Amino acid sequence: MYTEKVMDHFTNPRNVGEIKEASGVGEVGNAKCGDIMRIYLQVEDNIIKDVKFKTFGCGAAIATSSMVTELVKGKNLEEALQISNQAVAEALGGLPPAKMHCSNLAADALHEAIKDYMNKKEGK
Amino acid sequence: MKRIYFDHSATTAVDADVAKLMLEYMTEKFGNPSSIHSFGREVRKAVDEARGHVADLIGANANEIFFTSGGTEADNIALKGVAFANRKKGNHIITTAIEHHAILHTCEYLEKQGFSITYLPVDENARVRIEDVRNAITDKTILISVMFANNEVGTLQPIKEIGEIAKEKGIYFHTDAVQAVGSYPINVKELNIDLLTLSGHKFHGPKGIGALYARRGVRLEAQQQGGGQERSIRPGTENVPGIIGLGKAAEIAKRDLEKKIAHISALRDKLMAGIQAKIPDIKLNGHPTLRMPGNVNFSFRFVEGESLLLNLDLKGIAASSGSACTSGSLDPSHVLLAMGLTHEVAHGSLRISLGRGNTEEEIDYCLTVLPEIIERLRSMSPLSNSSTMAENNPCSHCHKH
Ligand SMILES: Cc1ncc(COP(=O)(O)O)c(C=O)c1O
Ligand code: FES
C-alpha cells in the first residue's frame, strides 16, 4: 500500500534523534489517531543547519517526518515555511488516502519548530 | 526470505486434503444436491456427511446445523432470526462490548428496528462478569449473545455459567465461536448453548463457508427467502465445495484437536515467556490463563502498532495490531478500549496468533528480531525518554484540530 519511497524512508529514516541545545523545537499530536511528532532545529544566520526528529506513529508518519527533515536541511526559514503537507506527500510519491492526515503532522511540527525559534529570538 | 505466518486468527491455510476433496466436488461431482438423479444424489449424500462432521465437532445433531456463507452470515441469522421470531416475547438482547463487528453492527441494526440492546462491559482481562449478565436480564430479554473467545486478545468467556443462567431463565443463548471452533474443545449440549456460529477459514477450511448451530426447537426466522435449502433458514443452492471442505476440515480438527492444542499452547507459552523476559515496559492483553491456545497479545509502550507490523513484515513475520493507525476508521480497537486501555497503550498492541504449522524455530526467530525492532522504534519515539509526555494524552498536544 506504500510507495517504494515511503518504505525507503520508513526503513532508513534520515535525521532521527534530538538536538541538545536546539534553536527551536516543535511538537504536534494527531487528534485523529493519537500520534506524536517532534522536530528539532539548529538555525544559524536564518539557515536551517541541522534538523532532527522523533516520531510515535505509523509508517506514513515516520516516512513523512524523515522526508520533511531532508527537504528543509540547508533551506532558509522563509523557504522552510513554504513547505506544505502536500509537498511532503508528493516528495514521497504519494500516500494512501487514509494516510494523508499523517503528512500534516510533519509539516505542522516543522512550522511549530520555526515558530518556537522566532519566539525565542524575539524574547532575547 | 522465509516467511512466517503468525496471523491464524485472521485466517488459516486450507488443508491439502480439504482442497483436494473440494476440487473433486467442483469437477467430477458437480451435481445439484436437490436433483434426484445420480449426479444429485451423490452430492446430497456428501453434503449430509459434511453436516455430520460439523455437528460432531461441537457435540450437536446433524439436523441442528445450517450452512451459511461464513461467520458473519451465521451471526446475522442468529441475532435477527431469534429477534424477529420472538418479538412477541420481548425486545431485549444482551451482548458484550467486545464482540466482533458481525455481532455489534447487527445489534445496532436491531436497535433501529426497535430492539433494546445491553452491551455488557468487560474486566481488564476482557472477561464478562457473571453478575453483570444476571443483572442485565429483564422480563423482556429474549437472547443473550456472548462470544466464546475474543478474536483480538483471546480471552475465553464464562460460557458454561452463562449457559446455565440462560437455561434457568428460559432465554436463548447464542455464542460466536468463530475463533474457538476447531481450536478448542466445545460441546454445545454440556454448555447449554442454543445457537453457535462457526466459520471454516479459521480452522483450515475454505473461506466463505460457515455454519449456524441452532438447537432443535429454537424459534428462528429466515433472513432471506428462496428455495427450501437448509430447511428454508438459508435458502439458495448450496455452496457444495465449501460445505464439503468445511466438513473435511471439521473431521480433521476433531481428530487432531488434542495434539494441536498441546503443540500450539507450548509454542505460545514459550513466546510469551520470551517476550516478557526480553522486553521491558510491556503489558499482556487478555487473560493470563483463560485464553485461546494460540493467542499472544502484548502492548509495547511508546511504540505504534503499524510501524511494528511493517518492521516485522520486513523480517518476514506476519502479525496484526489493534492500533488506530492500522484501522480504517483510525480508532483504536474497541476491544482494547473496553478493557480500559488508554489510547496510547492500545496503539502499541501486537497480536500474534499461532497455528498448527508453526514451529519452535519460528518462535526463536521472532524472539531475536522482535526485541531489536522494539528497541529501534523506541529510540525513534518522542515518548520514551520524556516521561511527562508519555503520561499525557497525545491528543492534548494537538494544535491543529
Ligand atoms: C469472532 C469472529 N466472529 C465473526 C467473524 C466473521 O467470520 P467470517 O469471516 O467467516 O464472516 C470473525 C472473523 O474474523 C471473528 O473472528
Ligand atoms: S500517524 Fe496514525 S495513521 Fe499515520
Image (cartoon, grey):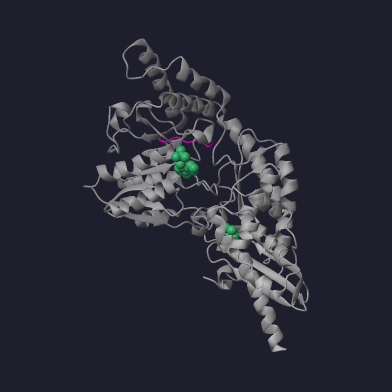
Question: Magenta includes B313?
Answer: no
Q: Nearer the viewer, residue B311 or B256?
A: B311
Q: Is residue B164 above or below residue B340?
A: above
Rendered image quadrant of residue B120: bottom left
Question: Magenta includes B185?
Answer: yes
Residue B79 in the image: state x and y as whole percent.
34, 44
Q: Nearer the viewer, residue A56 or B164?
A: A56
> Do we see residue B85 in this rendering?
yes
Q: Nearer the viewer, residue A42 or A82?
A: A82
* Relative horizontal placement of residue B125, taking residue B97 as reference (left or right): right
> Do we see residue B304 in this rendering?
no
- In the picture as drawn, the residue positioned furthest to the top comes out as B38
Quadrant the N terminus of chain B occupies: top right
Residue B358 in the image: state x and y as whole percent.
66, 36
Q: In this view, does A75 lie above or below B247?
A: below
Tell me where the magenta segment starts and ends, as one range: B183-189
Q: Residue at x 34, y 34 (%)?
A: B215
- The secondary structure that most of the magenta stretch takes on is loop
Rendered image quadrant of residue B226: top left
